[in-house]
Image (tube, rainbow, N blue to C red):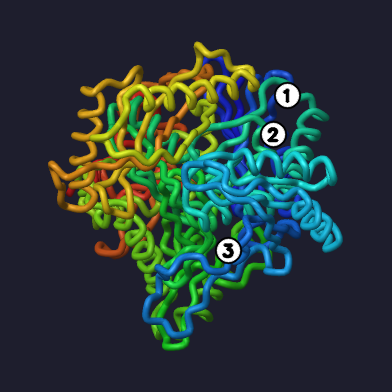
Amino acid sequence: MRVATDIGGTFTDLVYVDHEGRIGVAKSDTTPPHFEQGVMDVIRKAGLREEDIQDFIHGTTVIINALTERKGVKTGLITTKGFRDVLEIGRGNRPDLFNIHYKKPVPFVPRYLRYEVEERLNYKGEELVPLNRENLRNAVEALRKEGVQAIAVCFLHAYANPSHEQEAVALIKQVWPEVAVTASHEVTKEWREYERTSTAVLNSYVKPIAAKYIDSLEKKLEEIGVGGNKYIMQSNSGTTTFEQAKQSPIHMVESGPVAGIFGAAMLGKLLGEKNIIAFDIGGTTAKCSLIESGEVKVTTDYKIEWDRRHAGYPIKVPVVDIVEIGNGGGSIAWIDEVGSLKVGPQSAGAMPGPVAYGRGGTEPTTTDANLITGRLSAKNFLGGEIQVDVEATRRAIEEKVARRLGVSVEEAALGIIRIANANMLNALKLISVRRGYDPRDFTLVAFGGGGSMHAMALARELKIKKVIVPVAASVFSAWGMLMTDLRHDYIQTYIRRTHQLSMDELNTEWERLEAQAISQFESEHIPSDKVVFVRYADMRYLGQEHTVKVPVPGGVLDITGLQEAERRFHELHEQHYTFKLEGAPIEIVNLHLTALGTVQKPTLSKLEKIGGSVDEALKEIRPVLFETFGWQETPVFDRARMGAGITVQGPAIVEESSASTVVEPGQTLSVDEYGNLMIDTGV
């Protein structure tokens, strides 16, 4: 069987598919700081025979946690003479332009741990000044005395020629084999000094943390008898081997969240839905991404800790284009200093969790509000495993929210849900309306523990006609991992004007990138006949600063293929920026090769139960509070008993062990042949 585990902020999820296409799921508590223990717990809880696990795929929050909590290692930087302060200077395009109290991000490497060495290449990669090895030895010795555990090396124009960085890394390993080292060209070959330096530094900062975690996880898996292939989810929506993940852990920065986005794209292909908005609500955050024509969008302009007031820290590696906000089931409701109700970004997390969990939580959360309004049943928290404290939940909402606003507990709970929905609606607009896409042209795929509870109200606001709640919705990110291939992205800065381009030189560059990909996959035991290539070029009009990612035809590129790429560029530029300049000179900035090492993926089985009576699936009828309809007597159904073809009119709630789907009045739910819930929103 093929097994995937995903560590979330609250729960660790597991999904498996056996050779007959049957799906099984399990959930257990996330166990910080020893996250690997949560993986062992959920494998044990699923009742799997370890020797049956052929492929094990893992998504983890360890890297993003280490970065945001500043729990990486003491790191030093070695750079070109004159560029010691690149990390400090950063960029001038600060997000909060008129804030006189604005402060630049504090570098992960303080100035006293940043050392310069003599060396210089020009923008073509030609050597101007050779690497001063004595300078380098002195810098390494100084960093050793300071007690650093990792070193980042970033030289000017190393994206064009990495020879000086390679020489430097070889010397560092020779004089100090124990230290973790990252050269910038190993993680990115795109230009922009600040972004490359930041990426190399952050990779070094978490490298020992990643190695320790992956080694510990691998050891525990071996102890319980899990053999077979072991992969880790990357931020580009593909997987890689444990060994490769230890070398470039920065590629795992969004390891868990992107799997659900990829899963939504795969589900869309299966169901004939090419345009999808993937929407994931977990315990801590809500995440969304837009999938157009079946393609998951990937960007290298990713930043951690960026918001409208903070510049964040750039990471120049391919990451699925995802918008993430601090609003999930565990998000805390609070009253600010002017008496306004807020929800998030603070979260109750796994421990103590929402008040309803009865684990000592005292702050009301979105989950607590959903319990009070009847959307969640006290009898169905994690399939009945959690004994819910309804009275404590009511008291918390009354004391912290209702009394201060002068409303009833139920009105306060509905207010919490309204605010949470408003926050989530803004995130959905950021990846659709704000980027020139009409949400009415898309289908919403809702997953995560809370996705199916909020999706119908949000779809109504955005005029989205259809919502899909997939099988295993609460563990869908783990399901997405089951459908992934191994993936590596090779991005090379290659600045050429298309009207002056040598087609032979361009094809040679593509061939070089493809040969590099095949060599890497061979080291991971993937034969060349299993490798698939997809090409893109980052293009812009001459004189512009920013680029548009354009699909490029495969094979040997000729003038016709280049003209097709130019035509696509004009179209995409108009979509992104509302204008195009046909006839204006076009410039290629980067070549981007996506290489997929295809692996055998499971085929999904269809539901054995077809049709049947709605009454068989009915669990109870209970009052539920809806925003525009007030209290409604609402039938509650057991998802496990609903056969393919069953149709239910809203209001209705469909419960499974770790999620509830809330169907509003006027909406219609049906079950498809695979067991997915298809909701017609009635707009």
Q: Quadrant of the N terminus?
A: top right
- The answer to whether one can see residue 155 in this image is yes
Q: Residues within 10 Å of mark 1 (few under 14, many from 20)?
A: some
Instruction: Please give the count of numbered marks on the rendered protein.
Output: 3
Seen at 83% across and 63% down, the residue is: 146
Query: Who comes first in sequence, dot 3 or dot 2?
Result: 2
Q: Position of residue 417 (x, y in %)?
A: 39, 65
Q: CA distance from mark 1 to mark 3?
A: 46 Å
Query: Who comes first in sequence, dot 1 or dot 3?
Result: 1
- Residue assigned mark 1: 50
Relative to residue 143, is residue 476 drawn left or right?
Answer: left
Q: Residues within 10 Å of mark 2 (few under 14, many from 20)?
A: many
Seen at 73% across and 64% down, the residue is: 113
Q: Are marks 2 and 1 in contact (CB under 8 Å)?
A: yes
Relative depth, front residue between 438 and 374: 438
Relative to residue 606, is residue 649 drawn left or right?
Answer: left
Query: Who comes first in sequence, dot 2 or dot 1?
Result: 2
Relative depth, front residue between 194 and 596: 194
Which numbered circle lies on residue 433?
Answer: none
- Residue assigned mark 2: 43
Q: Position of residue 554 (x, y in %)?
A: 34, 21
As drawn, 269 above or below 187: above
Q: Residues within 10 Å of mark 3 (few under 14, many from 20)?
A: many
- The answer to whether one can see residue 383 in this image is no
